[in-house]
Amino acid sequence: MYSLLSNLELIAIMLFVLFSFIAANKAAKLVFNQTEKQLYRKTRKLLFWSVSLSLLAVAVAAADLMLAAAFSPLLWLDRLLIRTPLAVIPALLIWLGSYPRLRKLSQRTNGQTDAPPDVARRRQASAPAFIVPYQLAALSSMALFYFAFFPPVPFRWLAVTVPAALLLFIASLLWMLQTHRNQLAAKAPLLYRPWRRRLKHTGVLLAAAAVSIPFITAMEGSRLPDNLSMMAGKGNSFGGLISKNGSGEILSQTATTTLDSLNYGTIAELAPFNMSSHYDREFKMILDKRFAFYDGSFAAYDTINGEVFPNTPMFVVKEGELVKTTIVNRSLVDHPMHLHGHHMLVLSRNNKPVSGSLWWSDTLDVAPGETYVVAFVADNPGIWMDHCHNLVHAAAGMTMHLMYEGVSSPLRSVQPLSIIRNSLYWTLV
Ligand SMILES: [Cu+2]
């Protein structure tokens, strides 16, 4: 229910962004129409966009209200206090300010003639109270988009006041601009100048480039240092004193070398198999992220071989076989991969063979860009989960099965997703 409503709200918001920009663009261009016929046709079209926009605003509000009726405030407070007004207020202004003028314009008697629109028509088609509500809807849609992807959680009014003030400021600038255009339109027909449009586009591009500077700065600023105190963390109430009796200075520590399992220790025993062994099966496990449909949602998911569970093809083996798997992480986050029922022997990382003591692994953390080759003996018949041990990833589909030929299970689940969640929780952790 929660996912359904929040997805519904998100889809309505995305369409609101699209429709409001189309409507604002069409509304601003009305006054440039050179004949009554053209003006008539364009106003009829704008009527369609106005109704669609209002329906989307209703959808956003309805989804938010239903969330508010059924769930705890942390899940909907920002939605109801920010997103609902951002969608509903411009839609209301369109009905109050634009719609009556739109009706007047579309009900004219000479709507099918090639005569140029007269002064009264031009004034009507460029009245600020008519055009600005559409522009405000487009502005609000940008704010909606922002708050949908950067929700102010926990809720703070400050997170709302700054964007709201900015929005009102830009809206008043647009009002002034439209008043000016309205006055010009009263004097003479306005000519549509493509170079002005190009200039506007260039301005938008430059603004986008300017906005990307703080974005890149923030992204770079978020990089973690090479090494970090174990006590690092915002709001550390610890005071930084650790000792037996809870007071005193931290003992100075000498730096030690970093543990790297690839060459840690010495070869004490011979590996049962290595890169040059004969393998009965060789698998590839490509970890990545992409937009996908999963259990009724459309979002960016962590995938194995391009798929999410249960669409991920299984690895099928026979008892007694020697199996080699190459794991490649193409995504931007770590995936600690965990195979049930078997111990994997790591053979190499990024083509460098393991040179220390034998590196047996139950859960192998594969960092972005890394390639591991692992091997195991298929000596434990069953249907085993092979999944990312970041349980959020696993429950969202980064899960597959290692299966033995001839082995089946009579067990079923009425809720397929609960199979993953329960089995992760009870059998695999
Ligand atoms: Cu993962």
Image: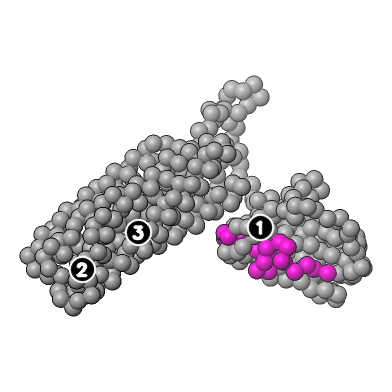
Q: Residues within 10 Å of mark 1 (few under 14, many from 20)?
A: few
Structural distance between the alpha carbons of marks 3 and 2: 22 Å
Q: Of residues 219 and 50, which is closer to you in this image?
A: 50
Position of 359 with respect to 321 (left or right) is: left
Furthest residue toward bottom: 114
Q: Residues within 10 Å of mark 3 (few under 14, many from 20)?
A: many
Q: Which mark is residue 97?
A: none
Check disc 2 and give the amino acid type: Thr
Q: Nearer the viewer, mark 2 or mark 1?
A: 2
What is the secondary structure assignment of the residue under circle 3?
helix
Q: Which residue is mark 2?
A: 109
Check disc 1 and give the amino acid type: Asp
Structural distance between the alpha carbons of marks 3 and 1: 33 Å
What is the secondary structure assignment of the residue under circle 2?
loop
Q: Does the beta carbon at disc 3 come under 8 Å from ligand 1?
A: no
Q: Residues within 10 Å of mark 2 (few under 14, many from 20)?
A: few
Q: Residue at x 45, y 46 (%)?
A: 61
Q: Residue at x 27, y 46 (%)?
A: 168
Q: Residue at x 86, y 55 (%)?
A: 411
Residue 314 drawn in magenta = yes
Q: Which residue is mark 1?
A: 295
Residue 317 lies, in percent from the top left, at 86, 69
Q: Residue at x 26, y 65 (%)?
A: 106
Query: Residue 36 is drawn in which quadrant?
Result: bottom left
The magenta segment is 298-316
Check disc 3 and give the amino acid type: Ser
Q: Which mark is residue 50?
A: 3
Residue 47 lies, in percent from the top left, at 33, 62
Residue 155 lies, in percent from the top left, at 45, 37
Q: Nearer the viewer, mark 3 or mark 1?
A: 3
Give the color scheme: rainbow, by chain, secondary structure or one colour.
one colour
